[in-house]
Image: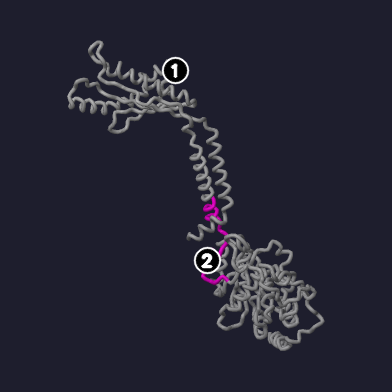
């Protein structure tokens, strides 16, 4: 993954990570509050060797001996020899082993000093234990460990308390700031781990980068998400200033610059699976193209689950299937929509053999005369992974435009659709991503509000349906060519 992918992961999951960070901080604080405060009190001892009237060399020898013995003395402090008298003197309800766990002794390197520390939940008791251990140790060294052989003689080793224990004012543990910080770090680490795991396990299309990994074809546009898309599918007409309408106008612009070698601009629009927005994309793109004054033919080539007639609010009982079987001429089946040069050819009745009809020569005889009159022909086709209809029709046109829904289309599905087109030898012209969020890391920059209020359609919805009383006089030649083609068949 690239650096921008990590930024996108953090952006997409920042709420989760923030919640886990707060929970981690709260957990660390709670754990710290549950701990019993522990106080540490320390005392320092000085170990020396008696050398009254000795020469300088003897003094050096005595100091060296003391340094060597200090390390051994530090190990003796935790034994019963030293701790049993402490337990008796302070009347402690504990054992030698338990008390030894609260006592630490250290001897700094190349010194003759010992530091004894005692830990207890009571600060005063911690100081008493430290002083008692120091006194008991001093007595054990001078009267037991280093007792002279001569009766009544003084021990050659002297242990002196140089810094008595004091009552601590602050607990040494728990370290509240440290525990809170560790809890926050742990919570944040868990949040980042979950975020990365979600990204790795998420096989859906989200961004342009996801598409670039599957195909080198251009991204023609991104359609903004609209939760009310099912209620108002023709958003370009219903709400021309919405971000979603601007997304279709951007797609229109990119489509106008799409290089198809100067040939007919006949495009099949399909998707990998159902409910990815291909039909609404086709219908809105047709309206957006007609806004520019272009002559547009919108054909519902989905002979299995047609939607165009319902979206455009036109009669769909007669349409493409009737033209393909020679029952009606294509010019008579076309229905004018709106006030522009947009004509709609609905699917007609659902046939038992859609693939055969779409792949027949009759489809060629439908497309060829339409290409002579219209600037753009858009054909809504079924999903590629369900049936072969889109690939069959795509071989008769300039190519296929794939629609992929952000957050819904799986990467393997889109890859399968691209592969099926490549296997069939059908050109893939580009990809349109639908259902893109208008905000957040997966948003697409083209979803902006329109600047100004100019649009070519009347705001009144009265002109949605076809004006049946008006003959399509502009398509007389087209109708004649269609009849001659039908007679030839």
Tell me the quarter of the picture where residue 434 sits: bottom right
Helix, strand or loop at disc 1?
Answer: helix
The quarter of the image holding the C terminus is bottom right
Q: Residue furthest top?
A: 151
Badge number at residue 244: none
Left or right: 37 with respect to 77? right
What percent of the width, then of the height, locates residue 98?
A: 43, 23
What percent of the width, then of the height, locates residue 308?
A: 71, 71
Q: Is residue 81 visible?
A: yes
In the image, 332 versus 65, the foreground residue is 65
Q: Which residues are magenta?
A: 194-219
The residue under label 2 is 214
Q: Earlier in the sequence, mark 1 or mark 2?
A: 1
The residue under label 1 is 90
Q: In percent of the image, x 76 and y 71: which residue is there?
A: 313
Helix, strand or loop at disc 2?
Answer: loop
């Amino acid at each position: 993954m690239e650096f921008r992918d990590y930024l996108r992961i953090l952006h997409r999951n920042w709420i989760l990570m923030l919640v886990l960070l707060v929970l981690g901080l709260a957990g660390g604080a709670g754990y710290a509050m549950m701990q019993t405060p522990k106080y540490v009190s320390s005392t320092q001892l000085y170990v020396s060797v008696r050398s009254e009237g000795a020469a300088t060399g003897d003094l050096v020898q005595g100091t060296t001996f003391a340094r060597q013995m200090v390390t051994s003395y530090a190990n003796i402090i935790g034994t019963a020899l030293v701790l049993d008298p402490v337990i008796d003197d302070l009347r402690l309800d504990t054992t030698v082993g338990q008390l030894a766990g609260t006592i630490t002794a250290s001897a700094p390197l190349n010194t003759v000093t010992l530091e004894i520390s005692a830990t207890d939940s009571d600060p005063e008791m911690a100081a008493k234990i430290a002083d008692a251990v120091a006194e008991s140790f001093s007595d054990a060294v001078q009267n037991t460990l280093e007792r002279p052989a001569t009766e009544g003689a003084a021990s050659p080793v002297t242990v002196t308390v140089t810094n008595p224990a004091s009552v601590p004012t602050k607990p040494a543990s728990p370290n509240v700031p440290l525990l809170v910080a560790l809890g926050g770090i742990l919570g944040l680490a868990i949040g980042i781990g979950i975020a990365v795991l979600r990204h790795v396990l998420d096989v859906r299309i989200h961004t342009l980068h996801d598409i670039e990994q599957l195909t080198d074809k251009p991204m023609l546009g991104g359609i903004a998400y609209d939760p009310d898309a099912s209620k108002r599918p023709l958003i370009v007409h219903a709400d021309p200033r919405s971000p979603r309408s601007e997304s279709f106008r951007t797609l229109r612009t990119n489509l106008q610059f799409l290089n198809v070698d100067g040939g007919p601009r006949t495009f099949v629009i399909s998707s990998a699976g159902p409910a990815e927005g291909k039909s609404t994309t086709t219908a809105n793109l047709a309206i957006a193209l007609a806004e520019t004054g272009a002559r547009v033919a919108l054909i519902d080539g989905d002979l299995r689950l047609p939607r165009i007639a319902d979206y455009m609010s036109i009669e769909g009982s007669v349409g493409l299937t009737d033209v393909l079987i020679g029952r009606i001429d294509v010019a008579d089946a076309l229905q004018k929509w709106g006030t522009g040069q947009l004509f709609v050819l609905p699917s007609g009745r659902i046939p038992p053999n859609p693939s055969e009809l779409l792949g027949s020569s009759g489809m060629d005889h439908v497309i060829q005369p339409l290409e002579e009159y219209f600037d753009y022909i858009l054909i809504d086709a079924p999903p590629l992974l369900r049936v072969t209809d889109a690939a069959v029709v795509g071989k008769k046109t300039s190519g296929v435009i794939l629609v992929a829904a952000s957050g819904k289309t799986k990467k393997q599905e889109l890859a399968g659709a691209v592969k099926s087109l490549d296997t069939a030898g059908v050109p893939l012209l580009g990809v349109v991503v639908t259902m893109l969020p208008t905000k957040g890391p997966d948003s697409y920059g083209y979803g902006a509000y329109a600047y100004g209020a100019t649009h070519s359609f009347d705001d009144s919805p009265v002109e949605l349906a076809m004006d049946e009383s008006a003959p399509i006089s502009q398509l007389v030649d087209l109708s004649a060519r269609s009849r001659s083609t039908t007679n030839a068949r």
